[in-house]
Amino acid sequence: MKRQNQSSVVEFILLGFSSFSDLQEPLFWVFLVIHLVTLMGNAIIIVIISLDKSLHVPMYLFLLNLSVVEVSFSSVIMPEMLVVLSSEKTVMSFVSCFAQMYFIILFGVTECFLLGAMAYDRFAAICHPLNYPVIMNKRVFMTLIMFSWISGIIEATVGTTWVFSFPFCGTNEINHISCEAPAMLDLACADTFLLEVHAFIATILINMVPSFLILLSYIRILYAILKMPSSTGRQKAFSTCASHLTSVCLFYGTGNMTYLQLKSGYSPETKKLMSLVYSVLIPLLNPLIYSLRNNEMKRALIKICQRKVFLHTV
């Protein structure tokens, strides 16, 4: 096999779902609809929370940040995937692939910590309602938000720079839906052991620790729910918690499976499926799970729409 050094690689070929040529066109329309719904749903949440000052409290400001992450995550991956589905494969420059991986890691890590912060916020509000204003004061809220974003930036900078410091040899075809680290390392022709150790430790700290804390938070929340006198209130709270936990388990579960073993024994198609869950499905579901089923969000949306109608009629 002829060996190429990193400087000689000027482009990569993203294969996507080219092995399923008969499904290319149907998948294109399915993912196009998913992308548009994801953008619309999260954009509605961002607009509602931004315009309604009554929602400028930690719970909804966390949701606003989560929606910004979801819009960004979807926009980093989906356009290139749609191009691949419409042309069977697409050529990405070295810089484009670097940028896509950087933002995938940035938004993925940020979402991990945001979900953890949101679970802590709900734990404080439900289990310690009297002390909630003290526990989740402005300083604590801003610290959690800044920590989430800065952690994403740091890990994206370290991880992406490290991956692209390796020489690439042989084929430049990426058998994946995006320039994710596991797919890129399959093309590296150098010893990636240290990076895999870093990825393992980072996954433990970024994925598994927050997911464990989220689980503990929801156990305490469910215990508090069981003490509720109203059966209707318990049923509603259980429904909300189940939805949140489903989203969290899907996101952290597939993320852990992907990044705990960068060069795993999973087939390329299995890797693509896992990537689709946390990069495509979760950004679509989160607006429905966290916000659009919320009565306060619905009331705020109706109020904004009525205000717009009123201004047009005046």
Image (spheres, helix red, strand yellow):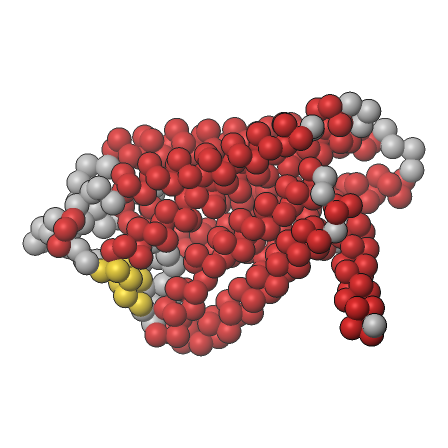
Rendered residue at 78%/31% (across/down): 126
Rendered residue at 80%/28% (across/down): 129
Q: Is residue 307 visible?
A: yes
In the picture shown, does residue 231 fall above or below 285? above
Rendered residue at 46%/72% (across/down): 28
Quadrant, the C terminus? bottom right
Q: What is the x, y in percent for residue 226?
A: 83, 31
- Between 301 and 54, the residue placed more toward the observer is 54
Q: Is residue 265 visible?
A: no
Q: What is the x, y in percent for residue 145?
A: 57, 36
Q: Quadrant of residue 210?
A: top right
Rendered residue at 11%/52% (across/down): 4
Asked if residue 92 lies left or right of residue 168, the reply is right
Asked if residue 132 lies left or right of residue 103, the reply is right
Asked if residue 67 lies left or right of residue 158, the reply is right
In the picture shown, does residue 289 fall above or below 173? above
Q: What is the x, y in percent for residue 125?
A: 76, 31
Asked if residue 267 lies left or right of residue 204, the reply is left
